[in-house]
Amino acid sequence: MGLTMSWMTRWFPPRCLLCGEPGWRGRALCAGCDADLPRIEAACRRCGEALPATGPGLPALTVCGACLWRPPPFTAIEVPFAYAAPIDWCVRRLKFHRDLAAGRLLGELLAEKILQAPPSVGAVVPVPLHGGRLLERGFNQAVEIARPVASGLAVPLVTEALNRSRAAPAQMDLPADQRRANVRGVFAPGGQPVAGTVLLVDDVVTTASTVREASRALLRAGADGVRVLAVARA
Ligand SMILES: [Zn+2]
Ligand SMILES: [Zn+2]
C-alpha cells in the first residue's frame, strides 16, 4: 500500500480537491486553499469551546470556566477547524458520497495538527458507527479520518475498542439537551482491549456529548486517559 501510494504520488501528483490546482506537500490541497481553511485559533484545551479574549496585559486563557468547574471525561480536545466551507464540504463528500480522497485529506490535516506536539498515546480509536448504519453506509468516516492520524503517530488504529448499541439520529439536527439524552449509554467496551492513553477521533463535534460518552466507555474499557481529536466544531 505504502509503495503503491508513493509511486502514485510521484507519477500522478495529487490535484487540489477544491480547485484543481497542483497539490501542496503531496496532498490533495493547494497552498492557497490551505491558507483559506477555517482554522479555530483560541479554544479551551479541555472542551474545544471558543475562549473569550482576556484584557490587555493579562495572560490568555487556556481552559474555560465550565471545564474548571466540571472537567470533561477526556483530558484534552483538539478541533482545528470550524464546520464551515470548505471543511463542511469535505466532510459531506466523505460521509455521503464515499469520497475517500476527501477523508484522507481531512485525516492528513488532523495528523499535521497533532504532530506539531505529538501526544504520548498508545492507540487511535475512531468513534464507531452503529452496526446497522455501518452496513447501510459501507464504511465508517471516522475510521477513514483516523487512518492518517494513526500512521502519522505510528500507533495502532483500534477499530473494535468500542461498540455502539444504537444508531443515533444525526446529532446536528437535535437541540443540545436531546443530543445528550440521545447518546447516554450508547457506547460499551468492544472486543479489543485498550491501555494507557487513547486518542479518540471523530469527524464533527457539536456539543461534544458523543465524545464524552465514548470517552467514558474507553475509560471503562481500561484506558488510563482519553484525548480527543476531531476535524471540525459545528
Ligand atoms: Zn486549491
Ligand atoms: Zn472548556
Image: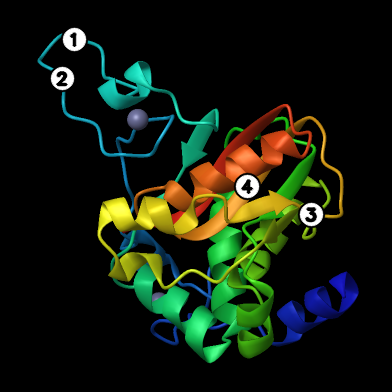
Determine whether the beta carbon of the residue marked 3 sits less than 8 angstroms from the nearest atom of ligand 2.
no
3D distance between C-alphas at marks 2 and 1: 6 Å
Q: Earlier in the sequence, mark 2 or mark 3?
A: 2
Q: Mark 2–mark 1 contact, CB under 8 Å?
A: yes
On the image, the x and y values in percent for residue 6 come to 80, 74
Three-letter residue code for mark 1? Leu
Marks 4 and 3, how far apart at CA = 14 Å
Measured as percent of width and height from the top left, residue 15 is found at 54, 83
Instruction: State which quadrant residue 44 falls in.
Output: top left
Quadrant of picture, ligand 2: top left
* Mark 3, other Cα within 10 Å: few <14 / some 14–19 / many ≥20: some
Q: Is residue 72 visible?
A: yes
Could you tell me which quadrant the C terminus lies in? bottom left
Tally of numbered discs = 4
Name the residue that disc number 4 marks. 200
Q: Nearer the viewer, residue 178 or 37?
A: 178
Q: Which mark is residue 58?
A: 1
Mark 2 and mark 4 lie on one chain; the one further toward the N terminus is 2
Amino acid type indicated by mark 2? Thr
Q: Nearer the viewer, mark 4 or mark 3?
A: 3
**Furthest-top residue in this view:** 57
Alpha carbons under labels 2 and 3: distance apart: 43 Å
Residue for badge 3: 190
Local crowd at mark 1 within 10 Å, few (<14), some, or many (≥20)?
few
**Screen quadrant of the N terminus:** bottom right
Q: Which residue is mark 2?
A: 54
